[in-house]
Amino acid sequence: MRTETATLAGGCYWCLEAVYDALQGVQGVVSGFAGGDATVTTYREVCEGRSGHAEVVQVTFDPDVITFDDLLAVFFTLHDPTTLNRQGADVGTQYRSAIFCHSPEQDAAARAAVAALAADGVWPDPIVTEVAPFTLFLPADAGHQGYYRRNAAQTYCSSVITPKLARLRARWAPLLRPGVEGRTP
C-alpha cells in the first residue's frame, strides 16, 4: 500500500481529527501545528499567537482508496473557509484555514479547489484559505491526540464536533469507514 500525507488547518484540530479519522483510506490522523517559524512550540504558545503556527491535522492516506481531492472536498464543507483567523468561537491566527502542500500536485489541486469554489459562488464571501508549501509539522502532546474519541460527552465535543460528524455522515457517507455511517457519536 502506498501512502501520501495531507496537512490541513481549519479551526480546532480536534474537529478535523475526528472527521478525517472517520474516512476510509485514512491510515492515521495526528493533531499538531504547522505554518509558523518556530521549530519547537507548545500549545500555549500557539494559542497565544506567538509561534505563527496554525492548529492542523496531518492525515496519512491511501490515495488508491481516498484521493487528495476527496480530502479537500470534505475540508471545504466542514469548516468556513471565508473567515480569516476564525472558526466559530475559536479566534486567532492559529485557527486559520490553510492547506500545507506536500507536492506540486497537491498545490495545483488545492489552488484548483479554491478557484472552483470561488467561481461556483458556493460561499457568499471570498475564500481566505491559505495555500502554502509544507515546511514543518510539530505534533501536539498526547493529551490532544484522539481527543474526541476520549471526550465525546465533553461540552465542546458534543456542541461543536458531534454536529460536524453528523454533517459528514449526511454528506459524505460513501467515503466513510464501514460501520461509521450509522454510528452515533
Image (cartoon, helix red, strand yellow):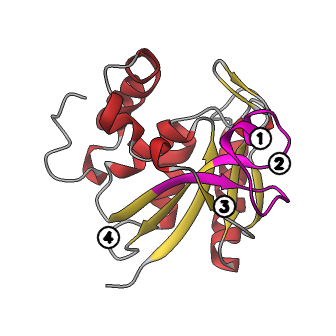
The residue that label 2 is drawn on is 51
Whole-angstrom CA distance, mark 4 to mark 1, is 37 Å
Closest to the camera, between mark 3 and mark 2, is 2
Query: Residue 27, located in which quarter of the rendered image?
Result: bottom left
Closest to the camera, between mark 4 and mark 1, is 1
Residue in the image at 42% along x and 14% along y: 155
Tell whether 62 sits left or right of 57.
Answer: left
Q: Position of residue 68 (x, y in %)?
A: 50, 65
User: Are circles 1 and 2 on residues that touch, CB within 8 Å?
Assistant: yes
The residue that label 3 is drawn on is 110
The residue that label 1 is drawn on is 45
Give the vertical position of 154 relative to 166 (above or below): above
The residue that label 4 is drawn on is 65
Residue in the image at 46% along x and 49% along y: 142
**Which comes before the other along the chain, label 1 or label 2?**
1
Residue range in magenta is 30-55
Q: Position of residue 166 (x, y in %)?
A: 32, 28
